[in-house]
Amino acid sequence: MAVAQDKMTPELLWQLGRVSGEALSADGKTVIYGVSQINMAENKSEKNLYAIPLAGGAAKQLTQTPGAEGDVAVLPGNKIGFSLKGQWYEMNADGSDPVQKTNVDGGMQNIRISPDGKHILFSKEVKIKKISGSDHYADLPKSNVQIYDNLNYRHWDTWEDGNFSHVFYATYNNGKVGTPVDIMAEEPHDCPQMPSGGPEDMIWSHDGKSVIYVCKKKFGKDYAISTNTDIYEYNLDTKATRNLSEGMMGYDVAPTFSQDGKYLTWLSMARDGYEADKNDVIIMDRATGVITNLTKGWDGTAASSRFSNDGKKIYFLAVIKGTEQLLEITLQKNIAQTTEKHIRQVTTGDFDINDMLAQSGNTLVVSRTDMNHAAELFTVDLQKGAVTPLTSVNKAAYDKIGMCKIEKRWVKTTDGKDMLTWVIFPPDFDPAKKYPTLLYCQGGPQSAVSQFYSYRWNFQLMASQGYIVVAPNRRGMPGHGVEWNASISKDWGGQPIKDYLSAIDDVSKESYVDKARLGAVGASYGGYSVYMLAGVHENRFKSFIAHDGLFDLKSWYGTTEELWFANWDIGAYWDAANANGYKHFNPSEYANKWNTPILIIQGGIDFRVPIEQGLQAFQLAQLKGIKSKLLYFPEENHWVLKPQNAIVWQREFFNWLKETL
């Protein structure tokens, strides 16, 4: 076989189709999926819907109207429903005769038609609080002042303006929408959850007689320091709301029903204020109200869950030793007797199962990635665990480039633990040569380094430019037991940083690693890690890149928004109990030791790690005469979302490495 000569580039990466599973036809024979393509010239994406036989075969494009179709649903009469530009559309199963069915003033988000087709559910913003100057003083309409008397005055990338996302329902008859009912009334609360909740936060009950929704019914300071979301049920007949997860103090999210409606399941964390707590699969018997934790004794954390079609099993996703896999729980006749002994891992392999779409017979349709491939849809044989490709949207692009060799390596840490470390090699890797090598520092801090495929922190792209990439599963990551996952809290600059150094030191023993050309790169907690390493690396590294990293913990605590995270992982700076962390785990305390070139990247509307963090680090480097550059994105948040900005990010990233490594 001829060796591919081309390599992954930033431009090619952003030309890839982004595949999303949408729905399964009523007969279980056809999969509907979305593909988003980036229009670089227009600096935006375009999404269309496609259909492909579950058994495999040629795909058919269903839509081509400008915009992004979402909320896809299979409807009676061989119809497909979807949202587009805030309205509800319906078309034939073959994509013909698309018709806009609604014309709701102001549009709708997260649209769902009830099981009996008689109601429509959606979310919409409602003005609840007075915030602006003109809200308070009608005679000053041009005033743009914002007035706050409580916390959570901004979140993620948006200042609080007094509007809250509420859940509505209305009668629905072939496109005719009745008077909407706000089931959250005048509450200053959001559903879906901010900043990244979606339609999974609001679902119909099996019989369409009630709405189940996720909400954190707290406001102001109470909201800013708590993770206590709950699962609520609103009854359409009585108009009454009840809290189904009353007394469960952490995140309760992602409700799903069994097909017969007898059971409701959701994901739950036990402790308030701990956003990365063990995520358990909870089941409620609707008839008795009895709640059972199905994964209480299982040493892991779940990512999502769904019932099998027959209601006898629950499938869920979880990170297992550096990969995200599909697992199943076999429900016992007496639900309370279901334990970790009834959990089975269905899939194995060096890939991530990152979404579950639908089940047909013994087949589950999933989304899958690995470090060499963006998401495509696959089918899983639920008995054998075999994973088979279904879509091939990006096959032509990948066929033209060389794939990277991925090695799983176990590294001994300073405290004698075994740490999984991914090593990614250039496509044309020659062990007789020496390569510049990058230590990748993951964010989170409690998110996994698995077989994910990022459009920014892309290991295939980095390696294809001639770098070996070292990506450790350092302390704090899921997939290695609850203790390993939890141990990073209040130890940010301790063992996790030692883990990073253990990984790069171990891989650097190889003859093909050029120890004179080592770099460290990362974002968020990964950016913090780079800043910490800049003060403690003892000249191991020749270059650094930090994106939206935490440079000074005291100023960060004083300006970040989700204070539950800051409180749990670091604590208030005025509390003497946290003095050690603010002294020894604070990158700014090591400013006198900085001596290495550094590229600093900062988003202008990143309220999680606000702008002063990047500016302080850049100012330090400049005043010390260290080669440094600031890459500032005024309109980007904690991520880089605009396509042309993303290309600039990657060009500057690799230009910096060429200059300094």
Image (cartoon, grey):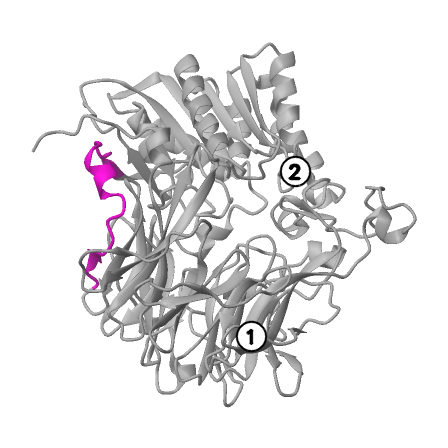
Residue 405 visible in rendering: yes
Q: Which residue is mark 1?
A: 176
Query: In which quadrant is the N terminus drawn?
Result: top left
Residue visible at 35% across and 77% down in the picture: 77
Above or below: residue 583 compared with residue 351:
above
In magenta, the rendered stretch is 385-407
Residue at mark 1 to residue at mark 2: CA–CA distance: 62 Å
Q: Pinpoint residue 516: horizontal percent, then vertical percent.
A: 36, 15
Secondary element under disc 2, as helix, strand or loop, is helix
The residue type indicated by label 1 comes to Lys
* Residue sitting at the far left: 1
Nearer to us in this view, 384 or 131: 131
The residue type indicated by label 2 comes to Asn
Is 400 inside the magenta-drawn segment?
Answer: yes
Residue 506 visible in rendering: no
Is 612 inside the magenta-drawn segment?
Answer: no
Secondary element under disc 1, as helix, strand or loop, is strand
Which is more N-terminal, label 2 or label 1?
A: 1
Nearer to us in this view, 81 or 109: 81
Q: Which residue is mark 2?
A: 580
